[in-house]
Amino acid sequence: MNSINDIPRHRADAVKASQDPARPTNKAAKVAHPVVQYCQHHQFSMWDAFKRLMKAPISTVFTWLMIALALALPAAMYIGLANVKTLGERWDGAPQLSVFLKKNVKQTQADALANKIKEASVVEQVITITPEQALSQLESTGGFDGVARFLPNNPLPTVLVVKFGGQFNSSDIQLLVAEWRLLAGIDVIQYDLAWVDKLNKMTAIASQFSVIIGAGLALAVMLVIGNTVKLSIESRRAEIMVIKLIGATNGYVRRPFLYLGFWFGIGGGVLALILLQGLIGSLADPVAELSALYDSNFKITGLSFSDSLVLLGVSAGLGCSGAWLTSWHYLREIEPR
């Protein structure tokens, strides 16, 4: 906060003018416009608060680190959920399901079922895999070379691989599956996208949990900054009383403490971004190696530029809010007597 010597200069000029008859008394020529004074006081308060933080670098850095950890945890959960959602939306290959027909279904009936399934607007393609083709694929890719020689007959059924295209959602697929199960000749429908539904439901639960955790940690940030501002107010109680004695309002006295909370919030937000960037960097290679095992090019991503600005804005807002609540409460109790 400004010291007593930092009271706006126009007040001191007015006193000198009253004592010196030769000094011009035209206030309009010497006193700045109130808007200019207001902006100048904001500028001075902002940089004065920053200088005071730099006078105690160790305690300031520790406070920033506490705030950064509280901000980085919900931000890391947000990054994780965003990457999981992206992973669910980017499964390799076209979304599809497999329709297993009964053993007694003839090829003509299988073709009729394929044509019936093609009538759905979201169906892009239906591939018919005959029992012979399925057995051949099993031998070539499943490690069962020559297994057909030991089988009295082919146990595999005809399979219709249904691929989807265009705009659709999970509810559309579920309705179609329920309708197709009623068709004669269909035995089992394997919904290959069921894991995406489960993933989305788990992500929704995790999102709600992260919101609760984020709200709790935001309150913790406000309490940390508020307690720090309270200590600063108590250490300058006598100075505040003198400034109020000469006419300073609570808003005028509160302003430097608001900038104190602002700098605490900004510093904590910057450290949080650094911690998150380090976390993403440390996980990038392991995630890429795991993705390569599944023949995928998935890469973990961090906060975008706009998300980073939002994090800094939230941290600064929490700092100002905590400082305002604390200064509003305690400055009312400090009155000159």
Image (cartoon, rainbow, N blue to C red):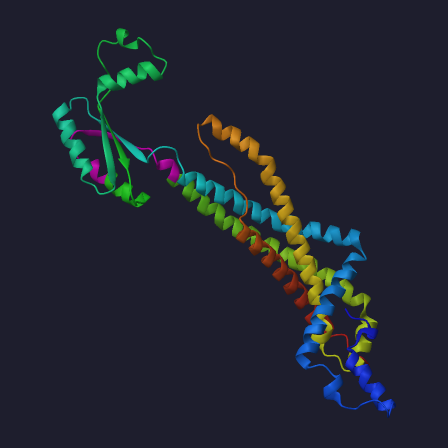
Residue 82, position as x, y percentages in the image = 48, 45
The residue at the far bottom in this view is: 21
Quarter of the picture containing the C terminus is: bottom right
Could you tell me which residue is drawn at 41 percent across and 43 percent down?
200
**Magenta span:** 178-196
In the rendered view, does 288 fall on the left or right side of 97? right
The residue at the far top in this view is: 149
Could you tell me which residue is drawn at 57 percent across and 49 percent down?
74
In the rendered view, does 127 fall on the left or right side of 248? left
Quarter of the picture containing the N terminus is: bottom right
Does residue 327 belong to the magenta stretch? no
Q: Can the viewer see residue 121?
A: yes
Residue 89, position as x, y percentages in the image = 40, 41
Could you tell me which residue is drawn at 81 percent across and 58 percent down?
55
Residue 172, position as x, y percentages in the image = 28, 44
Nearer to the camera, 264 or 51: 51
Does residue 190 belong to the magenta stretch? yes
Could you tell me which residue is drawn at 64 percent across and 44 percent down?
275
Residue 47 lies, with reference to residue 283, above or below; the image says: below
Marker count (numbered): 0
Residue 157, position as x, y percentages in the image = 22, 22
The quadrant holding residue 110 is top left
The quadrant holding residue 101 is top left
In the rendered view, does 192 fall on the left or right side of 274? left
Q: Can the viewer see residue 230?
A: no
Residue 23 lies, with reference to residue 291, above or below; the image says: below
